[in-house]
Amino acid sequence: MPLPINPITPLLSRFRRLSRGEKTNWGVLFALMALLLFVLVALWLYVYLKSLERPYYELKGYRVADQRSLTAFLRREHNRTQLAQLADFLERAGVGDVTPAANLLRQGPDWLDIEEPPFALPPQDQWRNMVATLAMVRDRVQPAVGPVEIVSAYRSDSYNQKAGGANGRAHQTFCALDLVPQSNISRKELIEELRSLHARLGPESNFGLGVYSDVRFHVDTCGYRSW
């Protein structure tokens, strides 16, 4: 039975028959290919390592502070204890199932640009303002447009001022949420569903609705209006 031929052997044989100049050319070509491969691997590794350093993840084009940023925030002073108290309050109010309480600490997606903390704790005397808004999201908004994710909830005065928000804005009183849909619903369909819902619920709902230039939208229960 003949032995199998090593596929490298014919290549080596052909290489040995090349002239010195041809061997040099092939050597240069292989060196350039190896260098290109090295550069590509190094670039991929750099991008990968930089992605690990980012304190956020992308959500529908918005930057949301990641778990490491939240953990760092909760290590400060009594933040973890206050968050637990907020979660307990919302649970007793019947809206603890809408979203993890930590999501309500997200100030907004432009926190890096304006050099503000990504999270802030609302004053305890404002916690009740969020109850009706969370109920609105769970009972009315999500049945109409599907699951949503919070990109902005409570905002400190400092954050709101730097972000260009209006004074007395509902975010500052812990009454408002900026949301994006988890699904790929189009902006046109999203607007149609939200405006139809807003009209059906009427002034007695205190439903405040705002739609931004993409699929991000604002929900509060601080007064019936829309924009």
Image (spheres, grey):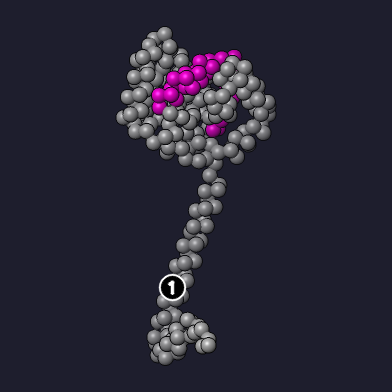
x and y percent of residue 220 in the render? Answer: 45, 18
Residue bearing the label numbered 1 = 32
Q: Residue furthest front?
A: 1
- Could you tell me which residue is drawn at 44 percent across and 76 percent down? 30
Q: Main secondary structure of the magenta part?
A: helix
Say whether residue 161 is visible: no
Residue 132 is inside the magenta segment: yes
Say whether residue 64 is visible: yes
Report the magenta residues as a range: 117-145
- Could you tell me which residue is drawn at 47 percent across and 40 percent down? 58
Q: Quadrant of the C terminus?
A: top left
Determine whether the residue tagged by mark 1 lies in a helix, strand or loop.
helix
x and y percent of residue 83 in the render? Answer: 63, 25
Q: Is residue 192 left or right of residue 176?
A: left
x and y percent of residue 27 in the render? Answer: 44, 80
Q: Nearer the viewer, residue 19 or 16?
A: 16
Q: Amino acid at mark 1?
A: Leu
Badge count:
1
Q: Nearer the viewer, residue 1 or 19?
A: 1
